[in-house]
Amino acid sequence: MLDHYNDRWALITGASSGIGAEFAVQLAGRGMHLVMAARRGDRMAELARELNTRHGTRCHIAEIDLAEPDSGALLFDELRRMGVEVELVVNNAGIGMIGQVESTDPDDVRHMLNLNLLTLTDLTYRFLPGMLERNHGAIVNVSSQAAFQPVAFMGAYAASKSYILHFSEALWAEVRSRGVTVTALCPGVTRTEFFEHAGAPGWLEKHISQTPAKVVKQALRAMEKRRQYVVPSWKDYLVTLLVRLTSRRTAVNESKRYFRPGRSDRDAGKSD
Ligand SMILES: NC(=O)c1ccc[n+]([C@@H]2O[C@H](COP(=O)([O-])OP(=O)(O)OC[C@H]3O[C@@H](n4cnc5c(N)ncnc54)[C@H](OP(=O)(O)O)[C@@H]3O)[C@@H](O)[C@H]2O)c1
């Protein structure tokens, strides 16, 4: 668990936009120094300058493609060489893919799973032992509300988020008595670049969404309370409960209404 933030280092993956950039803002506000990792170094450098001016935050920018198989090891070794002791890891970098099977490139799916699953797992296993040795530290793994059910037309993405939820919860149970905490963050729709990159531009404008600021505030509160997972909005939380009450068949059929490519809002909700 984090006993205090001040002058400690946080590693945030995917810190160049959206939820990751907001983690950078809120953690810098609490006095943490930051390792920001993503591909768009210019974006992170701009944010780092801002945070340094505002809070005196020390930032290290790691411009890295975290979908590359050895990227977790490279990042870990780089920080060890620099003598940076990471107190908090926010495994946030992730992408989504929305579409029909025939129009999905298997190489893109592999790329997504490398990023969403393999590098997240790799970084978790590399940083946790040091935290356990010191008896303090925290990991926040960014999952999704989609983790609680299968989602048609984004099956691989939703399943990758189920993995993150289950993996994080298992670790939470394993390490919680040793001063370290692992929390899975499961946001519903959030106003970021996610849907644009996932192949559903304009989707966000048509649906109710929350701000990254709210999501990160709830995430940090849950981490401080040492919770195993958090769904930041109570409405989204209710949906995860409803999914448990309904049949698996109904849940997956209902999910078709959201991401069916080319389906108009008027058609949404009609079953086959
Ligand atoms: N927005 C939502 O509605 C929502 C809901 C549930 C869960 N989430 C999860 O929230 C997390 C953050 O997404 P977001 O909503 O903030 O979307 P976003 O604004 O698109 O941010 C995604 C971040 O991931 C980084 N990233 C993507 N590919 C990468 C790669 N190959 N190597 C390194 N970094 C990479 C991006 O940086 P670069 O492009 O600079 O590399 C960016 O910083 C994701 O795990 C997503 O699954 C989002």
Image (spheres, rainbow, N blue to C red):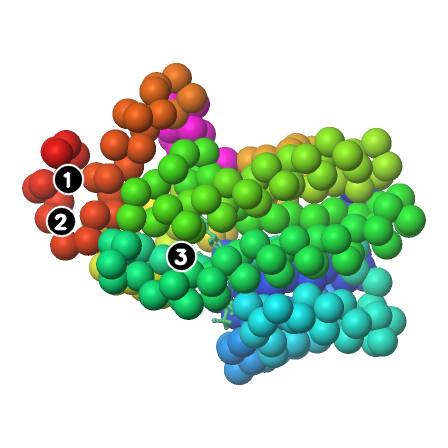
Is residue 159 among the parts visible in the rendering?
Answer: yes
Name the kind of residue labelled 1 in the image.
Answer: Ala
**What is the distance, in whole Å, between disc 1 and disc 2 at their CAs?**
7 Å
Residue at image point 78% right, 56% down: 127
| Magenta portion: prevailing SS class | helix
- Residue 237 in the magenta stretch? The answer is yes
> How far is mark 2 from mark 3, CA to CA?
19 Å
Residue 229, image quadrant: top right
Is the residue 26 above or below the residue 51 in the image?
A: above
Between 12 and 3, the one lying in front of the other is 12
> Disc 3 marks which residue?
96
Specify few, some or many for label 1: CA neighbours under 10 Å numbering under 14, 14-19, or 20 or more.
some
The answer to which of marks 3 and 1 sits earlier in the sequence is 3
What label does residue 268 carry, if any?
Answer: 1
| Residue range corresponding to the magenta coloring | 231-242
Q: Image check: 206 left or right of 143?
A: left
Q: Residues within 10 Å of mark 3 (few under 14, many from 20)?
A: many
In the image, taking residue 243 as reference, residue 32 lies left or right, namely: right
Instruction: Decide which of 128, 99 is in the foreground and name it.
Output: 99
Label 2 neighbourhood size at 10 Å, few (<14), some (14-19), many (20+)? Answer: few
Tally of numbered tags: 3
Camera-side residue of 220 and 112 = 112
* Mark 2 secondary-structure assignment: loop
Residue furthest to the top in view is 245
The answer to which of 145 and 114 lies nearer the viewer is 114
Quadrant position of the C terminus in the picture: top left
Whether disc 3's CB lies below 8 Å from ligand 1 is answered yes
Judging by the rendered image, the residue that carries numbered circle 2 is 263
What residue appears at the point 42 percent right and 61 percent down from the top-left corner? Answer: 109
Image vertical order of residue 154 relative to residue 229, above or below? below
Left or right: where 40 falls relative to 264: right
Across and down, in percent, residue 110 comes to 47, 62
